[in-house]
Image: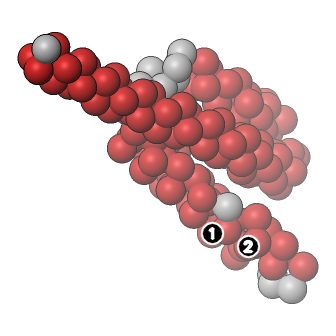
Amino acid sequence: MPASPSDLPRLQQLHGWLTLGRWAGVAGLAGFWLPAAPLAAALGLAAVVFTPLLVHALWRLGRVGWLAAFAVLVGGTMLGTVALGGAGVGLGGALGLLAFYSYTWVLRGAVAEWVREAEEAALWTREKARWAAEAEEVALSA
């Protein structure tokens, strides 16, 4: 589904949120120097806080396929963790965070493309209006 010019503000906002999430990768690298448990807790808290915003934005934009991919990738990983029980909680939590931040990394690239499409559509709409105004002006002067 191509992005429309009316979606541009929402797309730019979502792209800004996802760009902020890029710092989670830096935080993940900090795990080599910092204790893992507080870092994982902070990354998990950020994911929990951001998930409703992400789901709401994708729903309003009508990106149902991306919502389904989120449910399968992140939700499936977390359900697998529950199925493993107590033995897999640590590994499952790490895999859940990896799935979440991988998903948002890929989504950031897709949203950047949607922003570009919406900007091009807005430009095309402005150009069509300008051409129509010029044609009307020529018709009136003739």
Foreground of the two, 141 or 130? 141
Left/right placement of residue 18 relative to residue 23 reads: left
Give the residue number, with chain letter if any, for mark 1: 42
Residue at (31, 24) in percent of width and height: 131
Q: Amino acid at mark 2?
A: Ala
Residue at (54, 31) in percent of width and height: 117
139 is higher (above) or lower (below) than 115: above
Residue 97 horizontal/vertical position (percent): 73, 51
Q: Which mark is residue 11?
A: none
Quarter that holds the C terminus:
top left
Residue 21 horizontal/vertical position (percent): 61, 59
The reply to whether callout 2 and callout 1 are in contact (CB within 8 Å) is: yes
Residue at (51, 55) in percent of width and height: 17
Residue at (67, 25) in percent of width and height: 69
Helix, strand or loop status at disc 2: helix
Quarter that holds the N terminus:
top right
Answer with mark 2 or mark 1, whichever residue precedes in sequence. 2
